[in-house]
Amino acid sequence: MATALTDKLSLLVKKISGQARITEENVADMLREVRMALLEADVALPVVRDFVARVKEKALGQEVLGSLKPGQALVGIVNKELAATMGEGVADLDLAAQPPAVILMAGLQGAGKTTTTAKLARHLIQKRKKKVLTVSGDVYRPAAIEQLKTVTAQAGADWFPSDPSQKPVDIAKAALDHARRQFYDVLLVDTAGRLSIDEALMAEIKALHAELNPVETLFVVDAMQGQDAVNTAKAFKEALPLTGIVLTKMDGDSRGGAALSVRQITGAPIKFAGVSEKIDGLEAFDAERHAGRILG
Ligand code: GDP
C-alpha cells in the first residue's frame, strides 16, 4: 500500500520546517505529491492536471502559505476539492416524468449494467415504493436477456421478454407500451454493450434514447477500469445526454480514481456505487468518503 498522502506531505513539511516560511516552491513540492497520489489512484492525466491547477490556485490564495500546518491545510483543500468535484448535484434517481418513467442504462459490456439494472429495480421498489418493469435490448446475447430475467426476479420486479429477432428499438417500444397499459411507474431498459466503443453500438443506443425519451440516462462504469474509463466516458457523453453515473465494483481494490475522471469528463453526477455482486450491493455515492479513498 502506498504511503498516505497526508504522511508524505507531513514529511515534506518537516523537511522545510527549518526554513523561515513556506514558499511557493514548497507548495510546488507538495502539489507534486498530490499529483502522484492521484496518478497512483488511476485518475487520468489530463484530469489530474486540471485538478492540481485548481488546487494550486486555492493553495496560493494564502490558505496554505499563511497556515501553521501547511501540509494538513493542503490535504484539507485537496479533500474538499475532490469531494466537491465528485459530489456536486448528487441525488437519487429523477422520476419526474409522466409514468412510466424510463431509465436507460448505458456502458460497455461487463461494466455491470444488467446487475445494476436489477439493483436499481430493487432500490425503486423498496425505497420508493414503485412498480418496476425491466427489459433487455441486448439482442446479440440471448444469455444477457436470460440474465436480466433472473436478476429481475431476485429484485422482485417484473421482466418484459425480448424477442432477439426484433430490433432493440422495437422491443423497447413494445415494453413501453406494456408498461403504460399495466400502470408501471418505471421502465428500466438494459442495453447491449460491446467490449470497446463501436459506432454501431452508439448509433443503436442513440436511437433507443430518441425513441424512449428517458428521464434518466445512466452511464455504468467499472471503477477498476482506471485510465480507460476516460475514453469510454468521452464516447458515451458525446453520444448521449447522460444524467448520472453508476460506479460499479467499488468493492474491488482499486483506489477509485475513475470516479474523478468520469465525473469531470461527463459533468454528470455520480448517483450510486456498486459494492458487491449481490442484488442489495448498491449504495448512494458518498463523495467525501470516496475522496479519502482516492488519497489513500
Ligand atoms: P454488463 O455486461 O454490463 O451487463 O455486466 P454484468 O451486469 O453482467 O456484470 C459483469 C460482472 O460484474 C458480473 O460478474 C457481475 O456479477 C459483476 N458485477 C457487477 N457489479 C458489481 C459490483 O458492484 N461489484 C462486484 N464485485 N461485481 C459486480
Image (cartoon, grey):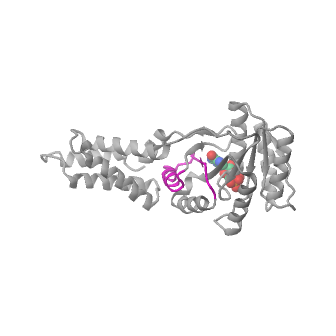
Q: Relative to residue 76, is residue 100 drawn left or right?
A: right
Q: Where is residue 151 in the image (x, y as percent from the top left)?
A: 76, 44
In the image, the segment drawn in magenta is: 240-267
Which residue is pictured at 47% across the width and 39% down the height?
A: 289
Do we see residue 296 in this rendering?
no
Residue lying furthest left: 20
Is 71 magenta? The answer is no
Residue lying furthest bottom: 199
Is 252 magenta? The answer is yes
Q: Where is residue 54 in the image (x, y as percent from the top left)?
A: 36, 52
Q: Quadrant of residue 211?
A: bottom right
Q: In which quarter of the image is residue 132?
A: top right
Q: Where is residue 251 in the image (x, y as percent from the top left)?
A: 57, 44
Which residue is pictured at 83% across the width and 42% down the height?
A: 180
Q: Relative to residue 134, is residue 38 drawn left or right?
A: left
Which residue is pictured at 63% across the width and 57% down the height?
A: 240
